[in-house]
Amino acid sequence: MSEKSSENLTYESAVLRLEEIVAMLEKNEVTLDESMALFEEGTKLTAFCSKKLKDAEQKITKLTKKQP
C-alpha cells in the first residue's frame, strides 16, 4: 500500500483487500516472497483500519460529550 494509494482508500476497501490477502495466504499457492509481500501489505492495511476505527471512536466520543 503506497502513500498515494492510501489517499483514496476507504475502510471498507481495506477490509476487502485484507480478506483477499488472507484467502491467498490460506491457499498456500504463493511463493515465500509473495507471501512476505502480502503479509507486509496486510500489516499496513491493518494499521490503516485500526487508525480509521480509532478516529471514528474519538469522533463519536467527542460528539456525545457535546450533548446536554
Image (cartoon, rainbow, N blue to C red):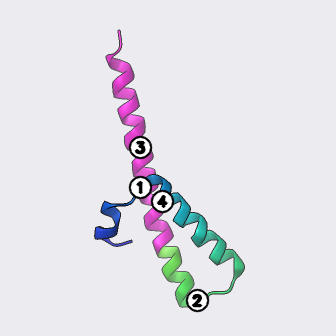
Quarter residue 63 falls in? top left
The earlier-in-sequence mark between 4 and 3 is 4
Alpha-carbon span between mark 4 and mark 2: 25 Å
Q: Is residue 31 toward the left or the right of residue 68 in the image?
A: right
Alpha-carbon span between mark 1 and mark 2: 28 Å
Residue under the point 62% across and 87% down: 30
Residue under the point 40% across and 48% down: 52
Q: Which segment is the magenta one?
A: 41-68
Residue 58: image x %, image y %? Answer: 37, 35
Residue 61: image x %, image y %? Answer: 39, 28
| Element class at badge 3 | helix
Asked whether 10 or 28 is in front, the reply is 10
Mark identifier at residue 46: none
Alpha-carbon span between mark 2 and mark 3: 33 Å
The earlier-in-sequence mark between 3 and 1 is 1
Locate the N terminus and report the quarter of the image it occupies: bottom left
| Element class at badge 4 | helix
List the residue tagged with mark 3. Answer: 54
Alpha-carbon span between mark 4 and mark 3: 17 Å
Residue under the point 34% across and 68% down: 5
Alpha-carbon span between mark 1 and mark 4: 5 Å
Mark identifier at residue 32: 2
Asked whether 15 or 43 is in front, the reply is 15
Question: Looking at the image, do the residues carrying marks 1 and 4 touch, with CB atoms under 8 Å apart?
Answer: yes
Identified by mark 3, the residue type is: Lys
List the residue tagged with mark 1. Answer: 10
The earlier-in-sequence mark between 4 and 2 is 4
Mark identifier at residue 13: 4
Residue under the point 58% across and 72% down: 21
Identified by mark 4, the residue type is: Ser
Locate the C terminus and report the quarter of the image it occupies: top left
